[in-house]
Image: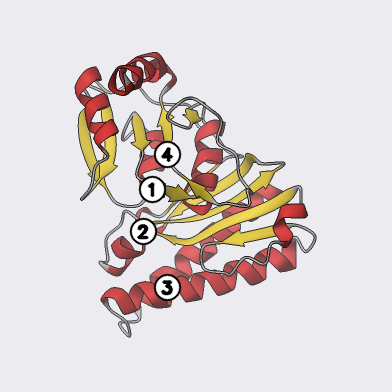
Amino acid sequence: MTDGELAAHLADVAGRLLLEVRASGVFAGAALGAAGDRTANEFLVHAVRAARPDDGLLSEEMKCDGTRLAKSRVWIIDPVDGTREYGEARADWAVHVGLSIDGVPSVGAVALPGAGRVLRSDRPQPLGPLGRPPRMVVSRSRPPAEALRVAEAIGAELVPMGSAGAKAMAVVTGEADLYLHSGGQYEWDSMAPVAVALAHGLHCSRLDGSPLTYNNADVYLPDLKIVRPELVGAVRAALDETAA
């Protein structure tokens, strides 16, 4: 099984497990989110270690022992991206399974169990037409100020959505045209989505244009942007203007 096939398979199985936990009716609200996190994390951690025992591993739901830092190949997973949305029985949550090679987001799969889809880096699809006006996905509750200013500058329509993975995949699938985030995230929030987005021909970087790197000692990532290639120049100009 290739790395891409493994990532997609594990994300898909974890997503189906999460749907079963939710459908059981045993948990609700925050307890449902916690149960889902535990279930998906246990499966993914054991599965990655069994399938790729020599690789490093970083998970949101697992204490890092630092051994990954000496590895070239490191799997970075988020068992439930959008725990709140999952607990609310919404559809805009995701499962992230990605592989960083020498810090580069090289392989990724993002399962959207609520939509019955798995987007993957090894099976890219052509991008659809650009939105007129362009559509920007933003947080349901706290859209970043930078994103709002860019949206105003380029005349973008705002599309509120839940998890980071769901937002990133909305750009991949053509439901949106750009995603800007400046409120701070962690490597597991974006690694797999960025690998998928890059494979589909999207521009992915920090807000200042510098590359996104992974498997760092400090896993905090302050910001990112995922943008249709046609909008890169306009978005860069708008960000430069807002920073001036």
Q: Amino acid at mark 3?
A: Gly
Mark 3 nearby-residue class (10 Å; few <14, some 14–19, many ≥20): many
Q: Earlier in the sequence, mark 1 or mark 4?
A: 1
Q: Is residue 168 above or below residue 235?
A: below
Q: Is residue 61 above or below residue 109?
A: below
Q: Earlier in the sequence, mark 3 or mark 1?
A: 3
Q: Residue at label 4?
A: 223
CB under 8 Å between callouts 4 and 2?
no
Where in the figure is residue 117, as x and y percent of width and height? 43, 51
Residue 119 visible to the viewer: no
Q: Tell me the element at label 3.
A: helix
Q: CA distance from mark 4 to mark 2?
A: 17 Å
Q: Is residue 187 left or right of residue 32?
A: right
Q: Which mark is residue 82?
A: 2
Q: Earlier in the sequence, mark 2 or mark 3?
A: 3
Q: Which mark is nearer the camera, 3 or 1?
A: 1
Q: CA distance from mark 4 to mark 3?
A: 27 Å
Q: Which mark is residue 164?
A: 1
Q: Tell me the element at label 1.
A: helix
Dividing the picture into quadrants, the one containing residue 229 is top left
- Residues 213 and 94: in front is 213
Q: Amino acid at mark 1?
A: Ala
Mark 2 nearby-residue class (10 Å; few <14, some 14–19, many ≥20): many
Q: Residue at label 3?
A: 36
Q: Which mark is nearer the camera, 4 or 2?
A: 4
Q: CA distance from mark 1 to mark 4?
A: 12 Å
